[in-house]
Image (cartoon, rainbow, N blue to C red):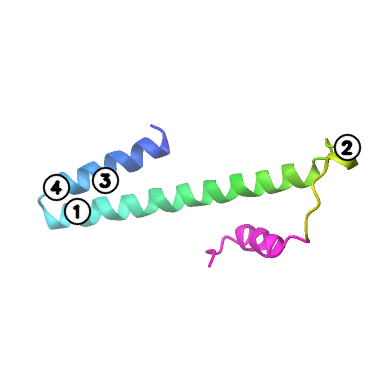
Amino acid sequence: MELEDRIAELCKRAIAEKDPAAVDNILAELKAALTEYTRAARRMTLLHFEYFRKQKAFPSEAKPQTAKPSGTEDVRKRIENNKALP
């Protein structure tokens, strides 16, 4: 089962469940699944940062003029260290 499908199923089960103890167990599973999903999303973000950083496909005259990116390296380091973004 895909992680997104598992999260959706756990949400449905938590809503439908009447037993508070069972809801606690379902929510613990849901928290773990969401943590795993967040880590995967962060890894994907890092891959995208690296991919676009390495791209040299545009000729120099076609590149838009940009200011120095502010905070990009900080975001990258936080993702690598698996810390929450502000």
Q: Secondary structure at mark 1?
A: helix
Labelled pair 1, 2 in contact (Cβ < 8 Å) = no
Alpha carbon of mark 4 to alpha carbon of mark 3: how far? 10 Å
Sequence order check, earlier mark of 1 and 2: 1
Mark in the foreground, 2 or 4:
2
Which residue is tagged 4? Answer: 17
Nearer-N-terminus badge (2/4): 4
Residue 46 located within the stretch drawn in magenta: no
What's the magenta region? 68-86
Is residue 78 covered in magenta? yes
- Element at label 4: loop
Local SS, label 3: helix
- The CA span between labels 1 and 4 is 6 Å
Q: Are dots 4 and 3 in contact, CB under 8 Å?
A: no
* Amino acid type of the residue that numbered disc 2 sits on in the rendered structure: Pro
Distance from label 1 to label 2 (Cα)? Answer: 57 Å
* Residue 33 position within the rendered picture, expressed as x and y whole percent measured from the top left: 39, 48
Q: Nearer the viewer, residue 55 or 23?
A: 55
Residue occupying the point 39% across, 52% down: 32
Q: Front-most of 67 and 56?
A: 67
Q: How far apart, in angstroms, are the residues tagged by discs 2 and 4? A: 58 Å
Expressed as whole percent of the image width and height from the top left, the position of residue 1 reads: 38, 32
Which of label 3 and label 1 is nearer to you?
A: 3
- Badge 3 local density, few (<14 within 10 Å), some, or many (20+)? some
**Mark number for residue 23?**
1
Count how many numbered circles sit on residues in the image. 4
- The residue beneath circle 2 is 59
Tell me the kind of residue under disc 1: Val
Whether label 1 touches label 4, CB < 8 Å: yes
Amino acid type at circle 4 is Glu
The residue nearer to you, when weighing 37 against 48, is 48
